[in-house]
Image (cartoon, rainbow, N blue to C red):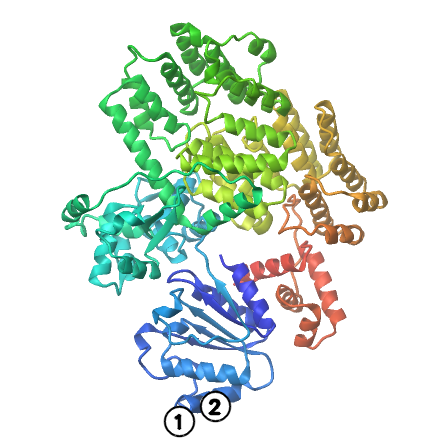
Amino acid sequence: MFEEEARRALAYVARGVSVRIVGGPGSGKSTVLESIAAGLEKAGVTVYSLLGSRLLNETPFAGIGALGLDGRGQENGPLGVAGVLAEQLALRGPRAIVVDDIDVLDKESAAVVDIVQTRTQRPLVVTMDDAPLDSGASVFTPARWPEATIRLSPLDYDQVNKLLAQTLGSPPDVDLTTAVLMKSGGNPRLVVRIAQSAELSKQLILRDGQWTMCGNTLWNEYLQSTVQAILHGLSADERTALHTLSVLGPRPLGSLKPVVETDILDRLEMRGLVALTEDSGGAMWVGVSPHIVVDHFRDPHVRSSRRVLADRISREIDSPDRPVKTSPPELLAELIRDLRNEAGAGTAATQHFQDQLRDLEESQFDVWDSEKTMSNAAAFLKFYWGGPIDPSRIEQVFGETETAGADPADHFFFAMTRALWAIVSGGQLAAATGILQDIGQAHPDWKAEAQAFALYLEASFDRMPTNLDETLDGLGSHHPESGVLPVIRGILELYRFDAQAALRALDSADGFEIAASVEPFVRGLALHIAGHGEEALIFSLSQRAAARRRLDQFGFVASSYVAVLAMTQQGLSKEADRVMASVFALGRPGFLVNFLHDAMLRIAGLRVLASSGKNVPSLGIQARKDVADIGPLPGTGKAVYELVTRKYADPADFDQNAADLLEQQLDRGYITEAVYASLFMLSLYPGYKILETTQRLLQENGANTHAQFLAIAGAVRDRDHQLLKILLDQYEADSDLPAITRLLKSTLRRFLHKRHHGLAKTLQRITSVFEDRFPSQGEQLTLDTGGQPQGLTAREREIAILAGSQRTPEIAALLGISPRTVENHISRALGKTGTTTRQSLYEHARNAQTNDG
């Protein structure tokens, strides 16, 4: 979970810099410190370890006693003990002091550490709580110099997913990961406790190799003591305030003044028990964090006063309408900054969004339940186009809504939704088109829209109709203001890679009354496919923010998908991860954007495989299995992901399978998916069949923007290194840069795995200048050709570990060998492991060491 933090700390210590690791209880800071101490010892550093204890912080020299000084010097107080310890630390060789929970270390031991470190200048690595320094929580606040601070952030969706897989022994599904993330607030200790207690309470079931929830809750009796530990030390007023907030739910800060005092909120925030979130209108909202505390106070065994408390709240508090801000940012830099701020808010912002979505669903269902009219049904069903679906509720709405006297537009939307549900709930396409035929007969002036939607269903869930243009041209709409025909035409044009035709269709519309939430998705994707990458990214991020403000989960997920495609193409990989994490944290969405959610899981899964290999469960396995192999848009079919993640004894098998898959996509009429898939698979292996199919596909569809990539791929395929060098030297950065980088790294790694060391050396020499011009960001996904790396010798493993944080001269000085010998060891280790960089070699050696242990 914390390899990056531990690596950074080791790099600081190697340069003589002290490190302060900051995090709340359960944040993993002790785990990080253990990893750092182990890394130091492996590097030959003598480590002096101390541990603070809240129960012993009044016992003199309790912490320093762990060093086994046998009481020497204690008769002279801290100065005497410091003298004894300083003598040891002054001995020859690298040495360091590590202290876990130094903020609760007894004063005498803290004084000794302070004196000794000042005298010897040995690096000091400590962990501390993240409470503000002016809280008086720590007796050890003097600044070390030089000192670096590493703050442990809450785990994100992917990290929680990995930790759950590690804890439970098998990977979780989307809903379980989402629920644990929200309940734990990303706290590692809570993630583990919630998972273990849920398994012990039989709240989880292993289905098809994945853990899933049996019901709608993860709260159980085993978690009571965990929450009690979190609440330990709260005053009566603080506990009452927390109880109040748990009953009340998230509220604007200003509305809480009658029931919760400001200074109490401040103290709860210092303890990390409440989170402040700014809404779209700039108002600050207050909610309990982590959310498992809310479950504790809502437990029947602890809510004896809940009714009294609820009555008091209802009398004293009003819930004002939220202000709405309607001016979205216009510049990409501002949008990226907003995205980072959103991610920095952690799970509190996501929890707030989830709570609002649940309230919206509940209120709209209540309106329909009180008056089961078609207009109320349509208003409710719009939520399910993007929001999580309750199958019993949607069936109830379809079965009990009154059709007499219904507005035809509402009735048409009702029928569209029912047709979609017929397909995604396991029905046949014929059943869905039958529903649309019936609505066209019942309301002839909506027949064109019904036929158009039937075309959309046929194209999306079967194949592109052969007479598409003739059929669409023959549809005459009586309701152009609905926007249904131009939006559907736009989507279908995107399926067959004609972005300009899609934009023309949208621009010809008289309005988008029914298709208002779909039009931004089609326009953003059209801009992206047309090659307007930055414009597509600005538009999609703006639409994503607007959808979040209006609680439109459909628009939020759909625009996030477009943003991810645009960011991936522009090399904004970290930002793409943030966007996908925000979508995953909300759980599985409604049926119309479910396939986009699956696509992002597969995209994220491939990124995880690039950095972690197949020893870590990929997010891609959370995508639904019961979907078609071939999809109409990038990632919406499962075949590409399954093809890439397979192991190949011979890369020629991948070449053949990839070419076959492209032909299947083209046979279905999904040209856009074929174009994206071909370019991606070509970057993994430039086989003869993939390259030939890609060239033909791009030529037939007038895509001439990938000429540089195709030429480089051809040179790599032919092993024409002279031409490759010329092409790389002449290369001008374009949208294919990530693919070209992946191609070069994949080829180099394949050469190393196949023991083609001469070819690898030549390729590395040719690409060195290119890598200096265009440094790669992170690890690259490579094709698994089944190469079995050789084992490292003890000396190679030792140097590989050091290579992650130290330069060659430093390693040579540390081990007493020449820099040339160090380089020789690193070169051999790179060849044996199939890695291409010192950092990836370090990661390989660490993983092997962990597995051996």
Q: On the rendered structure, is 845 left or right of 828?
A: left
Q: Earlier in the sequence, mark 1 or mark 2?
A: 1
Q: Write the residue at 56% across / 64% down.
A: 8
Residue on which the image places disc 1: 76
Q: Amino acid at mark 1?
A: Asn
**Could you tell me if residue 657 is visible in this image?**
no
For the residues bearing labels 1 and 2, Cβ distance under 8 angstroms: yes
The picture places residue 231, in percent across and down from the top left corner, at: 27, 60
Residue nearer the viewer, 19 or 520: 520
Q: Residue at x 70, y 69 (%)?
A: 808
Q: Amino acid at mark 2?
A: Gly
Viewer-proximal residue, 490 or 5? Answer: 490
What is the residue that sits farthest to the bottom in this orientation? 75
Residue bearing the label numbered 2:
83
Q: Quadrant of residue 794?
A: bottom right
Viewer-nearest residue: 788 or 3:
3
Q: In the image, residue 805 lies at what x, y percent? A: 62, 66
Above or below residue 536? Residue 511 is: above
